[in-house]
Image: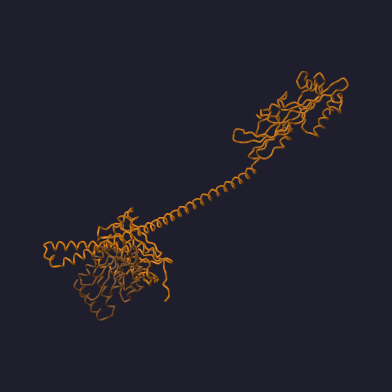
Chain colours: A orange, B brown
Amino acid sequence: MADTHSFEEMIDDHRIAQTLMVMNQRAGAFVDLGVIDQLGNHLAYIGPYDLKGKNYYGQAWFVEVMSKGVYISDVYMGFRQLPHFIIAVSRQENQRRWILRATIDPDIFAGIVQAAQIGRTGDSFIINESGILQTRSRFTGDILSNSNIKVSSFGKGTSITEEGNGQHRQILYAGCWLKNKNWLLVISRDVRQEMRSLFATRNVEVGIILAGILAIVLTVLFTTRLTVRQLMENDRKMDELNAQLVQSDKLAALGKMAAGVAHEINNPLAVIIQKTGWMEDLLAEEEFKNSPNYEEFKTSIKKIEDHVERARKVVHNMLGYARRMEPRLEDVDINQTINQTIDILENYARINNIDIQADLAENLPVIAADQAQLQQVFLNLISNAIDAIGKEGIIEVKSRRIDTRIWITVKDDGPGISDDQQKMVFDPFFTTKGSGKGTGLGLWISYNIIEKMGGTMTCKSQQGKGSMFTIVIPIVTPDKK
Amino acid sequence: MHYFNVLVVDDEEDFLDTLMNRLKKRNINTTGCRSGEEAVELLQNKFFDVVILDIKMPGGMDGIETLREIKKIQPEAEVLLLTGHASVETSIEGMKLGAFDYLLKPIKLEDLLEKLAQALEKKDTAEHKRQSEQIRKLLKYW
């Protein structure tokens, strides 16, 4: 404008008004327009304020525009007590220097700037080098107030910084230095607003990852627990198996030893019996019969024979088992065998007020087994139960078929067996009965018989409640004849 | 005195002596020896109706070998095997070789006499039958 118009033209009020109109048609932000001569006198003015005649000589902007040719002020209040800023251009015309000065309404200017405001939390404004707001901002502060933005954090070109404003809000600032003026156009946005969709995506991702981790952790926990439980179960089974192996190993070793010992005892017993027999033969002779100690000798010899007989029975039981290693297979009806055994013991039980209750499954098949041996086992178990109870009680004998096995249990309500003793019940020569009453071989022999049949025999007992012996034998079907 | 001869073969001296004494006391002609070899030698010179043979004799001929020899020399002699429990299988083998029966040690004399009677019975002659009866009488008296 200054270039296209001469000083004379511009000091004419009419022309200047026209110029302002033209300028406002293009930009629309100009409030007023004035012409100032090189001495600072306001020669022409068009605008809402009466500024004509004011002298600007010595004011900083005047000095600068005179020396540099162009001046753009920061927004200030000035004479008008309204925020505005000015653009002044000096022109050298012949020997004269004059200045065209325009005031710009920062509101209109701000309108342009504020067009960049986005969203509910977006803001855009201009600040000067000291951080003073040059346009009104939405959130950062009113015009001419300090924005508290660290101007130094913005680089030369366009830069972005992020700041917290103390209320846990992260605000993202994008700044760009304007050309020709040390003003910074700042566009700000609440990070949360800006990043909402990103946050949403992030949340979803975090959610998925967390869910994944949770799933993995749960799976790991679950499978680990399952594995641990399985391992423990296996361990327990192994322990049981080992215990059974140890048991049968121990019994086998003990059995061998016992058989060896028994055999060695047998020979001296044979001699003793012959000797006592010979003594009896001699005692029958006349001369001894008249001896005053004849009866003493006779009873002594009888006693020796009785005790040799006792020893012989022990040995016989042990070796009797060893002798009949191979069971004779015949068709055996388990229930019938049980009933026969109960019949044998019924009298003995009744005398002692013991009730033997049989609960026998009807679907038991006939199996191939050694009936005499099985009967011996049942006899041992039931008579043990009777002895354990002593007087008054109940013995339950049950038979069941489970899959390919027959289960037989003999349960009494006697005093039970202590845990320590339970480990030894199947040991040879272990007995809880008084001396001379039990050999301690019954259960041992029974155990071996059942084991030979491919079955198992176990004992469960609780002191004060009674004992239960369980026999499990495989069903071996007899050959068709 | 019964008219039959019994040979007892057992390596255990105390057992052998006592058993012989008891049989002799019951008027049974008893000869004893302590090994298979001795038994074979005796059998070559004298007839025995019954041989009571211990199956387990350590060293020298064992019971089974002796049994084989006896059956070669005097097939008509009945052999009663004395056995411990561990040698029951051997005794059964002995039965197959022609032994009359076996007895488990320690034996009671009445059992032995019963077997003796059965063995004589088997001989199936009038004389033996009579002798068998006599032994049974002995048993009744017990």
- Which residue of the protein is positioned furthest toward the front in this rendering? B45
Identify the image quadrant of the N terminus of chain B. bottom left
- Find residue B12 and report its horizontal and vertical position in percent: 28, 63
Residue A357, above or below A52 = below
- Residue sticking out furthest to the right: A94
* Front residue (pair A210, B4): B4
Q: Position of residue A381 (x, y in %)?
A: 32, 63
Vertical order, A263 against A197 (above or below):
below
Residue A129, by quadrant, is: top right
Residue A314, image x, y percentages: 28, 62
Quadrant assignment, res A368: bottom left
Quarter of the C terminus of chain B within the rendering: bottom left
- Identified at 69% across, 26% down, the residue is A130
Quadrant for residue A320, please give it. Answer: bottom left
Which residue occupies the foreground of this view, A254 or A109?
A: A254
The reply to whether residue A374 is in sight is no
Q: Nearer the viewer, residue A262 or B121?
A: B121
Q: Does residue B138 appear anywhere in the picture?
A: yes
Q: Is residue B130 left or right of residue A408?
A: left
Side of A268 relative to A283 (left or right): right
Q: Residue furthest bottom?
A: B126
Horizontal and vertical percent position of residue A309? 24, 63
Task: Report the residue at 27% width, 81% height from top.
Answer: B125
Depth order, front residue of B110/B12? B12
Please tell me whether residue A235 is drawn above or below residue B71 in the rendered image: above
Residue at 58% x, 48% y is A212
Please give the count of numbered marks on the rendered protein. Answer: 0
